[in-house]
């Protein structure tokens, strides 16, 4: 074994990259759940975004257009879910699961001719003076733009939910949809918008995988990242700040275990591969072990069907 | 007095029912106008039309001299109509200021709003701290939030749907003072309540609805409560009579019961002791949220406690599960009808089976005896006058009062030794309420011990032999109901013992 091959700087730098797709999907789902909707289709929306983003990038040669396409694809999938659950009042759990299965199959179909192709490269932040700073420059200031965009998005969502009137209305709908309706707020419209935002974010997360992190297209390449994002939202007690901790923890352990595998640590590979999932969940369970606090933050109408009785 | 709001021929039909049939009346400026009627008479639909939540099929409204057809609550609020809902439209996990801001069209900045809330709430003697979380407030304080939310918009018409059903008598006095002040400032109030004595003291005019039609109107100060009730029902009212009984042996004994609440905003029970005898109705009063739900859960077996804390017929039952308690003869009927006392989407037969399968032997060897269950459900419907097209109908399709009769009837017909009910007549109209009370009193007369948890003091005084008050999870020492006045009970609700209340 040769631990000297593990460079802390490289590890930390790559954990931010590994965490970004999950962080993007999770912040979208956080907004959806804060509006009182449980969309279990994150995985399906992510993989749809991954193939849409990949295909459009390859066809147009522009990675940015690819990201837009991924958002449109994710939001489109989410809209199917939104119409089924909000207008036709279908069960949110079953519809979300169906969306995941549909997305996996649909993306495989669209992606048949795209396996083995390399997408156009994605620009990265490179400010000559700053990126040269030892350690910090390499860790913080030498990533692709999406890493910073994802962090900015988390900050924006936090600000939106906490300080804006629209954010207050969205939270009120998640808290008590009957009361919000009685006050004259458009429960279904707000929820549809939230669901589409969630889909766009999940699509973006998927495209980050296929365009930047990997970067190529393989069937089922999200490999459960959508489910981790879902779990993160709950264990982060619906708080954007904790979402970053959770996502970076997951990314960090993922990178660490991959590197440990590479240097040939004497632990069975199966244990190493499960480590990110187990450790992330454990840590977040401990953080959120105060059940009273959890239920204070949890949107009280989460997953309940809203039906205007008149 | 000039007319502020005129309703002319308002009609609204739902599939199978005409909720409002050509309703016409008018409300003057600064008038406190009562809207009376049984459950299902169409009061809620009518106020929802005024508030823009429901569109009328026909008819029109005039508000401040102009045609008024609000398409949504925003439009109604902008015109000067505000409403305090029966089931508060508050968001528990949010602060007072956030809740108030949600009910306003153009809320000022946070700091200004907080200052306005303090100012207005002090002016009307309804003090409120804008930063507190709703879930931590008492029911009376929650109502203040609703009222302040309305007042900040300077409404011309304030609609109040059953505002006092959950308040202590002292809180009711404060509320009435506020409403009279508003009225003298020119704000009209449309007031819906089942409490006829209150309407007599507060309101200037009353309109009575029956089956969606205006059947009568009067000056309530000139009528007796009984006469008002009869106008609503359309027939003479039967008031349950209490017989003087000599209580027998102790059937239910609660001994230093303490239990933690399982919900974030619940109240834990602290050191509750209580003895209820055969033939006795024990009333437990107190403002909602002082441990009522927890007490019922502890007695029903939903919260398990130490074995010796609860004794039924001299058997320790504290750690027994609900079915084992039913076997012994301890039955309960919780407050929440849909979802707790009854499963909304299951038929009446299935709901009958859910609590009665042991005592009525509705199962054999784990298999359901459908015919026996149907017979039992039919018996409940017949004996308790539950109005439903049939026992195959889902519980949710029944009106509140009818479902309540079914739920209480289901427990009474199982012939319990001890019956605990929470809010047996909440939201139930006068005729159904008196039928339910009579049935409970008959049960006690037949030798059962009955515990009635309620926030309706008139009901408690009418039914109970002895009365205790729950306050912040503690139970006062029970007092003979005959010795207590409404005022004394009100003070006990605030935390004083019966012995300390000045006579």
Image (cartoon, grey):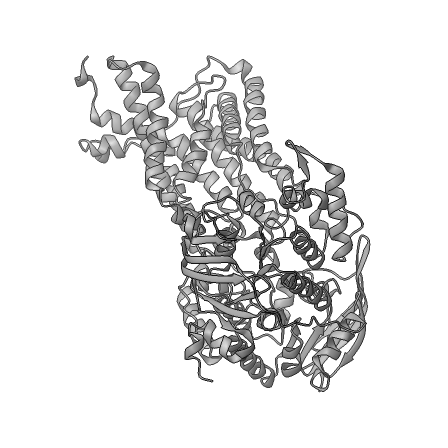
Residue in the image at 70% along x and 66% along y: B429
- The residue nearer to you, when weighing A218 against B444, is B444
Q: Is residue A155 above or below residue B223?
A: above
Where residue B488 appears, as percent x and y from the top left, is 49, 79
Question: If the image is split into quadrants, where does the N terminus of chain B sit?
Answer: bottom right
- The residue nearer to you, when weighing B46 against B163, is B163
**Looking at the rendering, which quadrant does residue A23 occupy?**
top left
Where residue B440 appears, as percent x and y from the top left, is 65, 62
Left or right of B473? Residue B209 is right
Residue in the image at 37% along x and 39% along y: A243
Where residue A55 appears, as percent x and y from the top left, is 52, 22
Residue B393 showing in the rendered view: no
Q: In this view, does A98 lie above or below B224?
A: above
- The residue nearer to you, when weighing A30 against B425, is B425
Residue in the image at 73% along x and 74% along y: B229
Left or right of B59? Residue A175 is left
Residue A3 showing in the rendered view: yes
Q: Is residue A186 above or below residue B157?
A: above
Q: How many dots with numbers?
A: 0
- The residue nearer to you, when weighing B72 against B20, is B20
């Amino acid at each position: 074994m040769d631990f000297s091959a593990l460079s802390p700087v490289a590890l930390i730098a790559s954990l931010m990259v590994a965490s970004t797709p999950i962080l993007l999907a999770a912040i979208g789902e956080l907004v959806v759940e804060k509006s009182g909707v449980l969309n279990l289709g994150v995985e399906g929306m992510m993989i749809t975004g991954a193939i849409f983003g990949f295909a459009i990038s390859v066809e147009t040669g522009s990675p940015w257009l690819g990201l837009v396409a991924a958002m449109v694809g994710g939001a489109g999938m989410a809209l199917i879910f939104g119409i089924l659950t909000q207008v036709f009042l279908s069960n949110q759990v079953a519809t979300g699961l169906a969306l995941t299965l549909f997305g996996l199959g649909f993306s495989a179909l669209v992606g048949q001719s795209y396996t083995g192709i390399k997408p156009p490269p994605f620009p990265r932040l490179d400010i000559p003076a700053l990126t040269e700073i030892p350690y910090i420059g390499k860790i913080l200031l030498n990533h692709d733009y999406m890493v910073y965009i994802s962090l900015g998005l988390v900050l924006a969502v936090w600000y939106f939910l906490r300080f804006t009137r629209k954010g207050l209305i969205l939270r009120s709908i998640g808290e008590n949809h009957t009361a919000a309706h009685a006050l004259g707020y458009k429960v279904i419209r707000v929820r549809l918008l939230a669901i589409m935002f969630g889909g766009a974010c999940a699509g973006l997360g998927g495209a980050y995988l296929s365009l930047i992190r990997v970067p190529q297209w393989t069937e089922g390449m999200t490999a459960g990242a959508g489910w981790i994002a879902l779990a993160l939202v709950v264990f982060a007690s619906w708080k954007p700040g904790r979402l970053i901790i959770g996502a970076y923890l997951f990314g960090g352990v993922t990178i660490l275990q991959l590197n440990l595998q590479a240097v040939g640590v004497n632990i069975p590979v199966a244990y190493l591969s499960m480590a990110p999932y187990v450790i992330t969940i454990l840590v977040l369970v401990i953080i959120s072990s105060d059940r009273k606090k959890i239920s204070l933050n949890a949107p009280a109408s989460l997953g309940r069907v809203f039906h205007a009785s008149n | 007095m000039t007319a502020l709001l005129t309703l002319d021929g308002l009609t609204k039909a739902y599939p199978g029912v005409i909720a409002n049939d050509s309703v016409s009346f008018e409300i003057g400026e600064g008038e406190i106008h009562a809207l009376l009627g049984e459950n299902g008479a169409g009061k809620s639909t009518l106020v929802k039309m005024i508030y823009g939540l429901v569109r009328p099929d026909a008819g029109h409204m005039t508000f401040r001299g102009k045609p008024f057809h609000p398409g949504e609550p925003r439009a109604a609020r902008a015109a000067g109509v505000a409403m305090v809902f029966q089931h508060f439209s508050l968001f528990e996990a949010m602060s007072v200021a956030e809740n108030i801001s949600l009910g306003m069209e153009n809320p000022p900045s946070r700091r200004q709003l907080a200052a306005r809330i303090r100012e207005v709430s002090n002016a009307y003697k309804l003090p409120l701290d804008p930063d507190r979380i709703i879930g931590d407030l008492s029911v009376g304080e929650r109502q203040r939030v609703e009222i302040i939310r309305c007042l900040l918009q300077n409404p011309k018409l304030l609609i109040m749907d059953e505002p006092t059903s959950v308040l202590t008598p002292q809180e009711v006095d404060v509320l009435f003072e506020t409403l009279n002040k508003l009225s003298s400032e020119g704000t009209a109030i449309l007031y819906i309540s089942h409490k006829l004595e209150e309407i007599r003291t507060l309101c200037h005019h009353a309109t009575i609805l029956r089956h969606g039609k205006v059947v009568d109107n009067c000056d309530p100060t000139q009528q007796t409560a009984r006469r008002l009730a009869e106008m609503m029902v359309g027939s003479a009212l039967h008031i349950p009579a209490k017989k003087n009984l000599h209580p027998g042996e102790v059937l239910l004994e609660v001994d230093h019961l303490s239990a933690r609440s399982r919900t974030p905003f619940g109240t834990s029970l602290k050191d509750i002791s209580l003895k209820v005898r055969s033939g006795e109705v024990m009333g437990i009063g107190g403002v909602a949220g002082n441990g009522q739900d927890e007490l019922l859960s502890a007695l029903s077996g939903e919260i398990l406690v130490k074995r010796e804390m609860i004794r039924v017929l001299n058997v320790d039952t504290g750690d027994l599960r609900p079915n084992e308690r039913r076997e012994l003869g301890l039955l309960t009927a919780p407050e929440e009808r849909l979802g707790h006392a009854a499963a909304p989407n299951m038929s009446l037969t299935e709901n009958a089976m859910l609590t009665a399968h042991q005592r009525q032997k509705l199962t054999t060897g784990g298999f359901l005896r459908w015919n026996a269950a149907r017979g039992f459900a039919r018996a409940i419907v017949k004996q308790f006058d539950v109005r439903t097209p049939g026992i195959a109908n889902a519980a949710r399709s029944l009106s509140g009062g009818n479902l309540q009769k079914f739920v209480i009837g289901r427990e009474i017909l199982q012939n319990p030794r001890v019956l605990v009910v929470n809010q047996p007549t909440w939201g139930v109209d006068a005729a159904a309420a008196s039928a339910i009370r009579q049935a409970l009193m008959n049960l006690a007369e037949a030798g059962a011990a009955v515990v009635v948890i309620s926030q309706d003091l008139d009901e408690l005084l009418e039914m109970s032999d002895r009365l205790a008050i729950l306050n912040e999870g503690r139970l006062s020492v029970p007092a003979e109901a005959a010795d207590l006045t409404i005022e004394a009970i009100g003070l006990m609700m605030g935390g004083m013992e019966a012995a300390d209340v000045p006579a």
